[in-house]
Amino acid sequence: MRWAPGRAAYVLLAAALWCASLTPRAAPDLAADRAALLAFRDAVGQRLPWDAAAASPCGWRGVRCDPAAARVTVLQLPGASLVGAVPLGTIGNLTALRTLSLRLNALSGGIPADIGSCTELRHLYLQGNQLDGQVPEGFFDLGLLQRLDLSNNRIAGGVSPEFNRLQRLATLYLENNSLNGTLPSNLDLPKLQLFNVSRNNLTGPVPKSLARMPASAFDGTGLCGDPLAPCPTPPPPPQPPVPAAANGSISAKLSTGAIAGIAAGAAVAFLVLIAVILFLCFRCQRTMAEKSAETAADADLDGSPVSVTVASMDMKNATRRSSQATAGNNAKKLVFLGEAPDAPYDLESLLHASAEVIGKGWLGTTYRATLEGGATTVAVKRLRAAPIPEREFRDKVIALGAVRHENLVPVRAYFYSREEKLIVYDFVGGGSLCSLLHGGSPERLDFEARARIALAAARGVAFIHSAGPRSCHGNIKSSNVLVADARDGAYVTDHGILRLVGAHVPLKRVTGYRAPEVTDPRRASQETDTYSFGVLLLEALTGKPPVNSVPGSTGGVELPLWVRTVVQEEWTAEVFDASIAVEERVEEEMVRLLQLAVECTDDRPDRRPPMAEVVARIEVIVRSAELKAKADTEDDDFHSISP
Ligand SMILES: *[C@@H]1O[C@H](CO)[C@@H](O)[C@H](O)[C@H]1NC(C)=O
Ligand SMILES: *[C@@H]1O[C@H](CO)[C@@H](O)[C@H](O)[C@H]1NC(C)=O
Ligand SMILES: *[C@@H]1O[C@H](CO)[C@@H](O)[C@H](O)[C@H]1NC(C)=O
Ligand SMILES: *[C@@H]1O[C@H](CO)[C@@H](O)[C@H](O)[C@H]1NC(C)=O
Ligand SMILES: *[C@@H]1O[C@H](CO)[C@@H](O)[C@H](O)[C@H]1NC(C)=O
Ligand SMILES: *[C@@H]1O[C@H](CO)[C@@H](O)[C@H](O)[C@H]1NC(C)=O
């Protein structure tokens, strides 16, 4: 059979038409998403390494798609040097987006007015830009939003009552903007867990539904009422009673029953008040002695990132008193554990050492003491006054001194007298993990450095655990992880001190690291160590201090809970500390470490992995990160972009 040429042409034409009609129907939306992304890049992100030749945007950095729907669902470009205003018809056209993160860039202008078209958005992170103008009206069409962070921008105008339309919001961060006016009094977001409007020009009362938020969520505003101080001009007492009182009939009714009631009530209240005062006075006397020690410790929980205060006099006074005590007390001496140091020193030379406070906490104060001549520097822990019998102290410290491992700070010597108990450690120079993370320059610690420090600390703790099922550290926290330098050594210190001192004095310990099953902080176990270590991992990854761990701040985060709420639906990059979140090449390792941390902080002790397993898993993560760093040294285009 032969085809007539006319007929062949007709068939070809038909096929071409069919194809033409099919192609746009096969991926119409993905093609539109691609066009919108390219327009976005042209406007604000010329340095994004997106391959414009690729037919699909799904492989581009920061872009993820839902293959079933053939749409872009995630756009995450934190710290990617985006500059300028986001034009209409770009983000607003990505109508299947569920997660949008453009935080830590230099975006300016307003929030794009057409963002309301992205009605699938659950997570929106625009913090750390220079966005200004008001929140656009269409914004409140985003009824599925769960996490919204607009903090650290210049967003102006009032907080609209329309926020009530975002009923699923669990996180609302608006701090450090230029919002003004009052908060809508009927604001009510039932799922809201994390909220912050600090550093805005807001005034007036805090809405009732927000009274349960911590006061620090409103820092630096002119707001008042619960949880802040009462509003300065409380609404004048309602007037109705006055005319009523002036009107004979009601006051007559009051006079009989009610007045008697009021009088009786007042009398009871007066008696109660007296009782309370008496009780307080009694308590006051009884605990005065305890108090003086406690308040000192209260004010400065361990791990002050506020670095070093020079306090050499204090140290000298301490040791001088000790040496006086010594004179009348069988001339007690500094006792060395293991071999004596190359350049031996004694109590007398500690007394003349120049000393600085490097840490204060519940269990005592730690000084750095540089001995005369400057050749030797040691860390001296002056324990909190506690009536520990000498024998017990000696035995326990000797046992601690016998625990030697390359990731544990060795105990070198001790001094015991009734008034003073000193423990001498090697001095580690680089500061604690706590001061490195929260002391002002966390960007010095990239992910790999954090992972290595965690690995070293895990090895130290695992070694303690390897001594037997009841052997544990008891007080793991970032201020007890000392770093020699960010690349290499890290050491765990303070091992066993909690048990040593804690057995003899009442304790209230830093709560942020404490496992939920712990009611008595002295009852540490390997499982509670693992929990504390998990919190420490979370702290290193998120850059946030755990609750109650930084002196003088009511802030801090219930880290395990917070991380769980953020990662509930999907692992987003949003939990990570801003300064490591940009390291996309190790994102996988970060997520794995995060996952490990979440396992360590499981509420059920038996579900937490043993420390030996924790060590093995961090080793794998560190090795993988190192390999990537090596492979990436040539191809470091994207990562060298910094905000
Ligand atoms: C966004 O969508 C609108 C309407 O569908 C369209 O006219 C516009 O070209 C799109 N923008 C881009 C950059 O594709
Ligand atoms: C407040 O936001 C601006 C950006 O608008 C930022 O530069 C600044 O560091 C922020 N302040 C604080 C305390 O975070
Ligand atoms: C708050 O208002 C004052 C005066 O009205 C203004 O000078 C200041 O810049 C405003 N602060 C912010 C963060 O907008
Ligand atoms: C809030 O600031 C805007 C300008 O950003 C101004 O027009 C408005 O009057 C202010 N409102 C109040 C209540 O101060
Ligand atoms: C709110 O943000 C400020 C920083 O602007 C911070 O100091 C404060 O601790 C935060 N409070 C809460 C509850 O997040
Ligand atoms: C008392 O009540 C009477 C009527 O019940 C009313 O006429 C009068 O104005 C009232 N007096 C005052 C002071 O309100």
Image: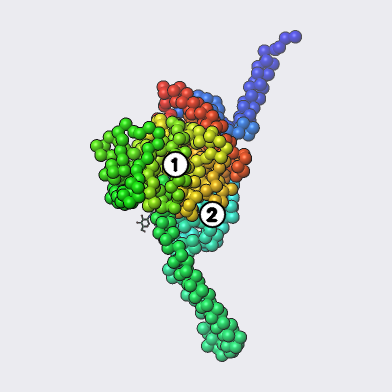
Q: Quadrant of residue 452?
A: top left
SS for callout 1: helix
The image position of residue 208, as x and y in percent, is 54, 62
* Front-most of residues 120 and 548: 548
Alpha-carbon neighbours of circle 2 within 10 Å: few (<14), some, or many (≥20)?
A: some
Figure check: 522 above or below 207: above
* Front-most of residues 638 and 501: 501
The image position of residue 247, as x and y in percent, is 55, 88
* Front-most of residues 219 and 25: 219
**Residue named by callout 2:** 163
Label 2 beta carbon within 8 A of ligand 4: no
Label 1, label 2: how far apart the Cα atoms are:
59 Å
Going 41% across and 52% down the picture, which residue do you hit?
Answer: 385
Going 60% across and 33% down the picture, which residue do you hit?
Answer: 66
> What mark, if any, has residue 279 been given in the picture?
none
Horizontal side of 352 relative to 534 (left or right) equals left
**Residue named by callout 1:** 397
SS for callout 2: helix
Going 41% across and 32% down the picture, which residue do you hit?
Answer: 489
Q: Badges 1 and 2: C-beta atoms under 8 Å apart?
A: no
